[in-house]
Image (cartoon, rainbow, N blue to C red):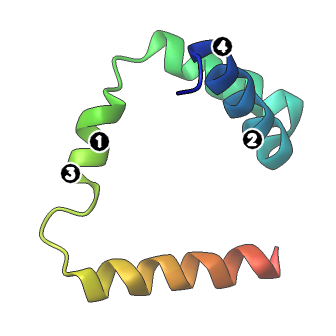
Amino acid sequence: MRTDSIVRVDAINVLLANLGEVDTERFISMIKRDTFDYTEWRRDLFKGKSIEEIHAMATDHEKNQRRA
């Protein structure tokens, strides 16, 4: 199992690679001041969607990422 420190560093690196320094800082600031519950958000993200709908969303997302 990876340590919390390793997960934290990897997460920051993913954010930096995808958002850049400024937006990564903005994101971290938003998370710190927001009462956002990531676990609850994830629980509701696909609520009521079939596996086919989730697959289509993932496929569309992947296609859009390749274009960017």
Which is more toward the observer, 56 or 3? 3
In which quarter of the view is residue 57 placed? bottom left
Residue at image location 63% in from the left, 78% down from the top: 62
Mark 2 residue type: Val
Instruction: Measure the alpha-carbon separation of dots 4 and 3.
Output: 28 Å
Assign a secondary structure to mark 4.
helix
N-term-proximal mark, 2 vs 4: 4
Identify residue for label 3: 44
| Residue 5: image tag | 4
Label 2 neighbourhood size at 10 Å, few (<14), some (14-19), many (20+)? few
Residue at image location 36% in from the left, 33% down from the top: 38
Assign a secondary structure to mark 2.
helix
Where's residue 65, x and y in %? 72, 73
N-term-proximal mark, 4 vs 1: 4
Mark 3 residue type: Asp
Instruction: Measure the alpha-carbon separation of dots 4 and 1.
Output: 23 Å
- Left or right of 13? Residue 30 is left
Q: Locate the C terminus by quadrant.
A: bottom right
Mark 1 residue type: Trp
Assign a secondary structure to mark 3.
helix
Where's residue 23, x and y in %? 77, 33
Label 1 neighbourhood size at 10 Å, few (<14), some (14-19), many (20+)? few
Mark whose residue sits in front, 4 or 3: 4
Identify residue for label 2: 14
Instruction: Measure the alpha-carbon separation of dots 2 and 4.
Output: 14 Å
Mark whose residue sits in front, 1 or 2: 2
